[in-house]
Image (tube, helix red, strand yellow):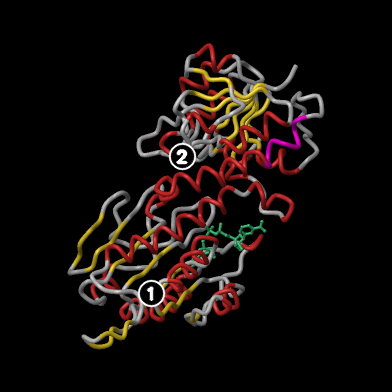
């Protein structure tokens, strides 16, 4: 029997993305799948129902969920959704396994196979499935636009009849996918951009985008291309060098993260108090604890004339392209599991499926999550 793939409107507050775009719905149909979509699911991402040509419309009822072989999501599935899925069904989306203990235990107990998009390995072959990257690029871009809108000054240099305007100084902290997009965006808007990361490999990337790399004399190469935790002495050296640059910035975009841990604290209260009046910090690590000591997730804090913005779910603010890219990530992940006759056949020897799997056949397959949920 052809695989039945379904997507519903997202239920989480503020979530405007949808897991299925019209383009990807057609591709799944062309691959032989039956595609179900809840009415109006794409509306908040600017995909009106009329754009979906090859879907069957459904409501978000338990009966619909029970009929699915695969449920595509953006946010982790809810307890009610998991309760309605049939045993052996597949859920694919962001699973936030570290934060959804109850949901993961239920997925295990109901023998549902769940794949977490945030666990897709960062290998070359899986780049087209890398939803962390596609969504981080959006966050980096949007953060610079928020900075531009929040500042009481221009970003570019302007020569006008009323005199010359100096360009804004923008400092990007953390040069992963989001940071690189933030650098490129700030450059396009005409700011003078400098950037810093503990990984020395980023030095050349920063320079190739026409920005200046902030040298602190500290390197933190970790396994797998990710950063490692710094020692106290290294942190102090990093801090002193960075504080001097933070004090000169009109806008700081902070994106630093260490996988599986709270975001590193890099911008102290003291550093904020040395900044210029009217300066802004856009802390896109707000949801994982913030890079700035004063960040409040979902709020804008005013501290001695400096605005600290802690945005949450930035990709949802660019829902059209975020959904388009995310849906392609899902398609590229799932397509190899759709056989020529349209049935579902997961190759468990494939490291992409194996390493992205959270639960399968009544067990938690992802070890850190098993330790968290089962205390093993
Ligand atoms: P991330 O979101 O985990 O972290 C963002 C950045 O913060 C990283 O560059 C990290 O080095 C930096 N950081 C951490 N602690 C810091 C500190 N104390 N001070 C300053 N910066 C700090 O990163 P990401 O965007 O997901 O990318 C992580 C790595 O994975 C990078 O090496 C990236 O090039 C690589 N990557 C590889 C692929 C692929 O090959 N398929 C795809 C995407 C990313």
Horizontal side of 166 relative to 142 (left or right) equals: left
First reached walking from the N terminus: tag 2 or tag 1? 2
Q: Residue at x 23, y 73 (%)?
A: 273
Disc assigned to residue 17: 2
On screen, 197 above or below 124?
below
Q: Which residue occupies the extreme left position in the image?
A: 304
Give the image quarter of residue 12.
top left
Marks 2, 1: nearer the viewer: 2
On screen, 258 above or below 17?
below
Q: Secondary structure under badge 2? A: loop
Horizontal side of 123 relative to 79 (left or right) equals: right
Residue 216, percent across and down? 48, 81
In this view, the residue in front, 37 or 76, is 37
Residue 264, percent across and down? 43, 61
Crowd around label 1: few <14 · some 14–19 · many ≥20 (10 Å): many
In this view, the residue in front, 293 or 22, is 22
Quarter of the image for the C terminus: give it. top right
Q: Quarter for ligand 1?
A: bottom right
Q: Residue at x 58, y 77 (%)?
A: 208
Q: Residue at x 54, y 25 (%)?
A: 37
Specify start and end residues of the magenta stretch as a single range.
Answer: 332-338
Q: Is residue 336 magenta?
A: yes
Residue 39, percent across and down? 47, 23
Instruction: Look at mark 1 in the image and give the residue it sits on.
Output: 170
Considering the whole magenta stretch, tell me its main secondary structure. helix
């Amino acid at each position: 029997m052809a695989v039945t793939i379904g997507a519903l409107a997202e239920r989480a507050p503020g979530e405007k993305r949808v897991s299925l775009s019209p383009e990807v719905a057609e591709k799944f149909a062309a691959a032989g799948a039956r595609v179900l979509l809840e009415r109006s699911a794409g509306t908040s991402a600017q995909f009106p129902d009329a754009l979906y040509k090859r879907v069957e419309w459904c409501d978000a009822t338990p009966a619909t969920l029970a009929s699915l072989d695969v449920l595509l999501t953006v946010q982790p599935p809810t307890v009610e959704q998991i309760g309605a899925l049939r045993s052996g069904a597949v859920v694919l989306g962001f699973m936030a396994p570290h934060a959804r203990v109850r949901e993961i235990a239920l997925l295990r107990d109901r023998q549902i196979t769940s794949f977490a998009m945030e666990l897709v390995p960062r290998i070359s072959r899986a780049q087209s499935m890398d939803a962390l990257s596609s969504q981080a690029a959006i966050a980096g871009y949007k953060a610079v636009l928020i900075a531009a809108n929040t500042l009481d000054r221009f970003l570019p240099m302007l020569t006008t009849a009323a005199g010359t305007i100096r360009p804004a100084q923008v400092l990007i902290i953390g040069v992963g996918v989001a940071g690189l997009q933030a650098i490129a965006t700030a450059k396009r808007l005409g700011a003078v951009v400098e950037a810093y990361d503990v990984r020395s490999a980023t030095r050349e990337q920063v320079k190739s985008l026409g920005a200046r790399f902030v040298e602190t004399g500290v390197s933190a190469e970790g396994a797998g291309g990710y950063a490692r935790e710094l020692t106290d002495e290294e942190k102090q050296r990093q801090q002193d060098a960075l504080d001097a640059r933070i004090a000169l910035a009109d806008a700081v975009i902070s994106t630093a993260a260490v996988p599986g841990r709270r975001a590193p604290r890099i911008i102290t209260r003291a550093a904020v108090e040395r900044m210029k009046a009217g300066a802004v910090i856009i802390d896109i690590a707000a949801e994982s604890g913030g890079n700035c000591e004063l960040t409040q997730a979902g709020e804008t804090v005013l501290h001695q004339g400096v605005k600290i913005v802690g945005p949450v779910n930035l990709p949802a603010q660019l829902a059209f392209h975020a959904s388009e890219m995310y849906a392609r990530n899902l398609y590229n992940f799932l397509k190899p599991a759709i056989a020529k006759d349209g049935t579902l056949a997961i190759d468990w020897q494939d490291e992409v499926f194996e390493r992205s799997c959270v639960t399968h056949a009544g067990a938690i397959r992802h070890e850190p999550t098993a330790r968290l949920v089962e205390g093993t």
